[in-house]
Amino acid sequence: MEKKLLVAAALLMTSCAFISAQAPMKPEMSEFYEPVPPTVTPGTELKGGGFTAPSDAIVLFDGKDLSAWENSQGGPAEWKVKGGVMTVDKSKGDIRTKEKFESFQLHIEWRVPENIQGSSQSRGNSGVFLQGMYEIQILDNYNNKTYVNGQAGSVYKQTTPLANAMRKPGEWNVYDIIYTAPVFKEDGTYRIPPRVTVIQNGVVLQNNTTILGTTEYIGFPKVVKHGAGPIILQSHGDPSEPISFRNIWIRKM
Ligand code: MG
């Protein structure tokens, strides 16, 4: 017993000595200076509202032309460009970026006409396809009900947005989309599924949401192995007046 007490006392003395031997903590012990994040100059304010692209972004549409885009056959993109705005031409189908992307931050502004008609999915329907595979819904949901996992900002037919942050028809809506590309296993299933954050007009609609697979109109998500892919903008077949886009840029991550 006495021996055990002696050992315990010796241990206690040793640990006290160890603690007092350590240097006292200082603020700079938990601060580091490398690597320095790159400097990105934010965009400047535009006359018609919004901001130009940050300095390290790839500009996909700055109001001038569709040179960054092609149609789904690889031919020229033929949507209308006028007054700094591109407008869907339903007779020409979807358009996609010529460049393919992995993970990114995408900024895109969209507007449905003030006099838009139609209801549910037939009212200002378009969409942004991430890596050409996964649709973030674009729809006029200002006083327009539809299935909630198909409303604006949904991962189409998968995940309902956290809010309805629509501006009125005729006003510009802004999507900021942060997307993390999936990692696949050898067998073609996800090792790490794709994830997406969607902010509309400053309101979070998707918060690092797991994408389950392709966004099917009929049926359930499919897991399909893919690599880098384009941004596709949807030309939807509904009879409502076509939607317009402006100020589109992307930052690779
Ligand atoms: Mg759509």
Image (spheres, helix red, strand yellow):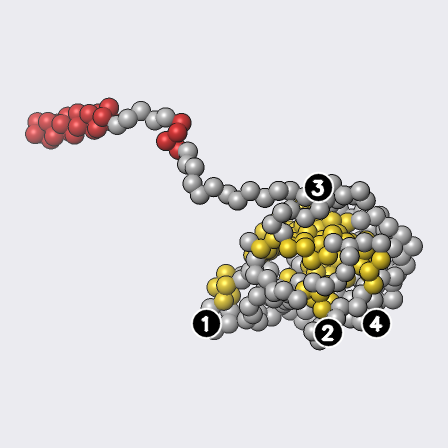
The residue that label 2 is drawn on is 75
Q: Residues within 10 Å of mark 3 (few under 14, many from 20)?
A: few
| Label 1 element class | loop
C-alpha gap between disc 1 and disc 2: 33 Å
- Closer to the chain start, of discs 2 and 4, is 2
Residue 186's x, y, as percent? 45, 72
Residue 174's x, y, as percent? 74, 49
Labelled pair 2, 3 in contact (Cβ < 8 Å)? no
- Quadrant in the rendering for residue 244: bottom right
Q: Nearer the viewer, residue 36 or 236?
A: 36
Q: Which mark is residue 44?
A: 3
Labelled pair 1, 3 in contact (Cβ < 8 Å)? no
Q: Which mark is residue 186?
A: 1
Q: Residues within 10 Å of mark 2 (few under 14, many from 20)?
A: few
Q: Nearer the viewer, residue 1 or 84?
A: 84
The residue that label 4 is drawn on is 91
Q: Is residue 138 left or right of residue 224?
A: right
